Image: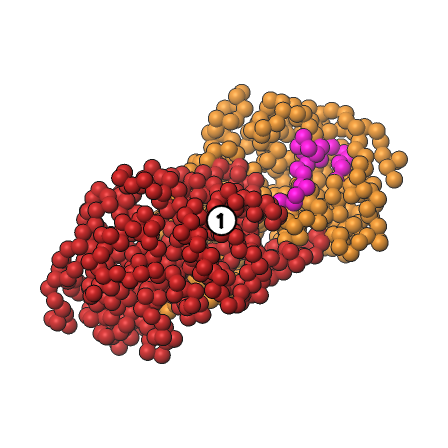
Chain colours: A red, B orange
Amino acid sequence: MTDALPQTQLAVKWYPPRCDVRLESVPVPRVQHPDDAIVKIELAGLCGSDLHAYRGLEDISQPHVCGHEFVGHVVALGESFSPTSSPSRPPLYGTLRVGDKVISPFTTSCGDCRFCRLGFTARCVSSLLFGSPALPGAQAQYVRVPDAGGTLLPVEPSSPLNAILDKNLLLLADILPTGLFVAMQALAHPKLAPVLTGHPWPASESEFLKMEASASAAPLTHEDRTLTVGLVGLGPVGLCAAIALIDRLASLSVPLRIVAVDTNPIRRTKAQTIISTFSQSTLEELHVVDPDEAQVIVRKWGGGGCHAVLEVGHSISHRWVCPNMSHNAQVVGTPPALTLSHGLLAPSGVLSSCGVHQAPALPFTGREMYNTNMTLEFGRCNVRSLSDAAAGLLVRQQDALSEVVERIVPLTNAVEAYERFESGEWGKVVFNVWA
Amino acid sequence: MTDALPQTQLAVKWYPPRCDVRLESVPVPRVQHPDDAIVKIELAGLCGSDLHAYRGLEDISQPHVCGHEFVGHVVALGESFSPTSSPSRPPLYGTLRVGDKVISPFTTSCGDCRFCRLGFTARCVSSLLFGSPALPGAQAQYVRVPDAGGTLLPVEPSSPLNAILDKNLLLLADILPTGLFVAMQALAHPKLAPVLTGHPWPASESEFLKMEASASAAPLTHEDRTLTVGLVGLGPVGLCAAIALIDRLASLSVPLRIVAVDTNPIRRTKAQTIISTFSQSTLEELHVVDPDEAQVIVRKWGGGGCHAVLEVGHSISHRWVCPNMSHNAQVVGTPPALTLSHGLLAPSGVLSSCGVHQAPALPFTGREMYNTNMTLEFGRCNVRSLSDAAAGLLVRQQDALSEVVERIVPLTNAVEAYERFESGEWGKVVFNVWA
């Protein structure tokens, strides 16, 4: 099935120790395992987490093809893909076909292991990250997808996704589900249920664990039913998180106030513009500000802080940036970002942090956690199991989301694109790999 | 209304720097504020968290009356308590009467502030802890209860609680709701919903945020629907957490496996005995073991670890114990206890830690949190808003729970009781304050 594929292709490769990517000719991948698919890529994304390796923050020294966001078409499949595939295997092993248009999550997931069955596809036991030494990435013309029947998201002929531009479909590979994930970790937490439902904790804990709250308090006020959220970091994931949040609160008819924080004025301006494109929302207040102003606004709101803070990569001056660069870096989960987030959070709040975290220890003591009844939600987004929800969000909010990708450039511009994206000068970049 | 009260009473007072409690004659409290109640105490508890001050772990130097668990009768009320109380005030301001039998949470809560209205009574803006320099405690014959209309739990004449012995009602002041809280923080978390409901994440996130999980995985197996829980610390709160957990899983008809860990063999024996008194449960496996054995069992179960770990005070050799004592101390949330808990937890698991945490920083890096998609749930139990749920649990599981309190001693034995409870030689102790 792979005879028609060329022998070589263009790809962006990373070289150690840092800030060195090169456009090279590399072999086109072939099917190596019965569960593999080969995908011919149309568009590939450049993501903030590509910058971790770029900056030399990951503990790796092996050159590899970069990139983990792509949309394309299946051009070859392994032997597992058959209409008579076992019914205990993930459905795509019986239905995926050569020619299908697909989007891929940034990690593979088998669909067969306990974590996949439960929906925690990011923690699949055989999960591999595209664009790492373990799996060549997607800033290339072809990519091999292991466990393709558990991994790939097909764009069905009848899907409303067919009306969406590829540059926007690409958001489904990582940053839109990741933004949804970081918002949902907060919104779905039982501690936010009183604000969203009007029933005091713990009555609305969950559908099947329902318990009556003891009558010891005055009734909730209108102000109690207004959700306050801090958003720390206004990169592409931060924009997606804001859009996911506004979309969901509108569907719940719950008033929302956001304080959105970034030290980068370019990001702040873009966030203000995108969020103001919403035609329907319950957004009562939006403040796009720097960290000092954020504290003032939250104090003015009262209530001891925000119900939730979403932390997705705060711009800080950081010892890890490339030695020859003088600008700030956007890094998620750093102690300064988490300390800022904690400072914006009310007692009994949820701090949801998403992105590829680095080594520093959490800057919280047990006593601080106790004194503020804080929940910490961390981890990698389960993109595959969130795909349908993220696709629905993309269809509903395509106007706002179409502003997230700033430019499409040829793969031959990759070196410049990395430099300008790393410096914060460019926002989200997508590569046309055939231009 | 307070004319009939005596001038002085017996009370247990703590003196700095540590391990010094004395039985003294102190003034009987009087109503100081219109929202106050004076309660004549019948029984008062000695709790693990009394030991924090006892051991000199709290940053306090002021002598104070100890104790924060009590059951008794209202003997005086301030002027706020009136049948014509404002309908916007907590209901007890209109209904509490002199003579009512009451149980008190270990902290006061006004019932009027934003946190109380939402159900987060532990974070009430005017909350005070009984048995602290801010509020004299309940190891005494009388106690003043501020914000009594938001705080006290009345035992209504028609309540099934009237059939429960006072020594067991006393569990409602702290350790039973705290055990329920630590279990519920895990059970009500959306990450445990797939195991409990059979619907992969995120479909069962919550009733009002329902989203369909994308079809990328094989169906859940029977094994996937078996909840595995680690319980670190088998003091009184650990026993209550185990009972809450078993009770809830039985009601959901979901199979349960517990690995329960303590280094203290007396505690292990007691836990084994109590848990085996359950007549109805879905408990498939119970292993009451030391930390090394726990790791082996969890590895044998497979699945990468437990779905949840409840951490409620692990016995460790600790630099904070009283200098003249050679035994281990039970302290919640220490780095060794949290590291052990993390070691027992599967990726995408929930670590729920409850108790009064101390100063050390959390022993986790951002990268560890990311790599394991860990949720951390910390904080003080919202006893008042959990009172009804805890009372129901007490009524259902009174046989098992009646084993938690080991002995009732006169208040005059307080010094010995502190010493023996601190050393782990005695389990839960209750004081008969009139004997």
Q: Is residue B177 left or right of residue A261?
A: right
Q: Position of residue A70 (x, y in %)?
A: 28, 63
- The residue beneath circle 1 is A289
Q: Quadrant of residue A382?
A: bottom left
Q: Is residue A238 visible?
A: yes
Q: Is residue B233 left or right of residue A312?
A: right
User: Residue at point 38% right, 61% down?
Assistant: A404
Give the answer, above or below, for where B126 lies relative to A404. above
What segment is highlighted magenta in the picture? B123-145
Q: How many marks?
A: 1
In the image, farthest residue toward the top: B324
10 Å crowding of disc 1: few (<14), some (14-19), many (20+): many
Q: Position of residue B306 (x, y in %)?
A: 42, 51
Q: Is residue A205 visible?
A: no
Q: Position of residue B328 (x, y in %)?
A: 49, 29
B33 magenta-colored: no
User: Residue at point 20% right, 65% down?
Assistant: A435
B131 magenta-colored: yes
Q: Nearer the viewer, residue B420 or A164?
A: A164
Q: Nearer the viewer, residue A163 or B127?
A: A163
SS of the residue under disc 1: strand
Q: Position of residue B48 (x, y in %)?
A: 59, 36
The N terminus of chain B: image quadrant: top right
User: Residue at point 72% right, 42% down?
Assistant: B71
Q: Main secondary structure of the magenta part?
A: loop
Q: Is residue A20 left or right of residue B354?
A: left
Give the answer, above or below, for where A332 lies relative to B409. below
The C terminus of chain B: image quadrant: top right
Q: Which three-letter amino acid code belongs to the residue tagged 1?
A: Val
